[in-house]
Amino acid sequence: MPKRVRCACRGNPDCKLCFGTAAYEYEPGPRGWMPFVCPTCSGTRAVTVEGERPAQVCFTCSGAGTVDPADPPRDDSPRGLIRNLWRIFFGG
């Protein structure tokens, strides 16, 4: 059963993982939630965007080279706080 996981790029259209939707589908395998090589930078930790001279830190993996679906970026909005409190008190 695939899950929707929030992408660290925050909706960047140049992201090759979510293609700008800010979330991607991930199905845990038999070993669970395993990290995988970042598709945007191919594990090099830097990406060159067309029109910009120096290479920048990859916006999809934040310079790690891998994406860990078990540790998605936090939602710092008030909606994220309410969701986290709901999970603490009511489960889920």
Image (tube, rainbow, N blue to C red):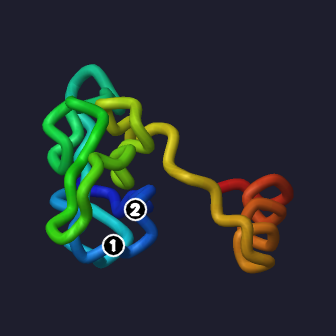
Above or below: residue 76 compared with residue 27 = below
Circle 1 Cα neighbour tier, 10 Å, few/some/many (<14 / 14–19 / ≥20): some
Q: Are marks 1 and 2 in contact (CB under 8 Å)?
A: yes
Residue sitting at 25 percent across and 76 percent down?
13
Residue 44 at what x, y percent from top left?
21, 30
- For badge 2, the amino acid type reads Cys
Q: Amino acid at mark 1?
A: Asn
Q: State the CA–CA distance, disc 1 to disc 2.
A: 6 Å
Front residue of 7 and 5: 7
Residue marked by disc 1: 12
Which disc is residue 9 wearing? Answer: 2
Q: Image check: 73 left or right of 80? A: left
Q: Where residue 19 sits in the image (x, y, percent)?
A: 20, 71
Instruction: Assign the N terminus to one quadrant of the image.
Output: bottom left
In which image quadrant can residue 61 be found? top left
Which quadrant of the rendered structure holds the C terminus? bottom right
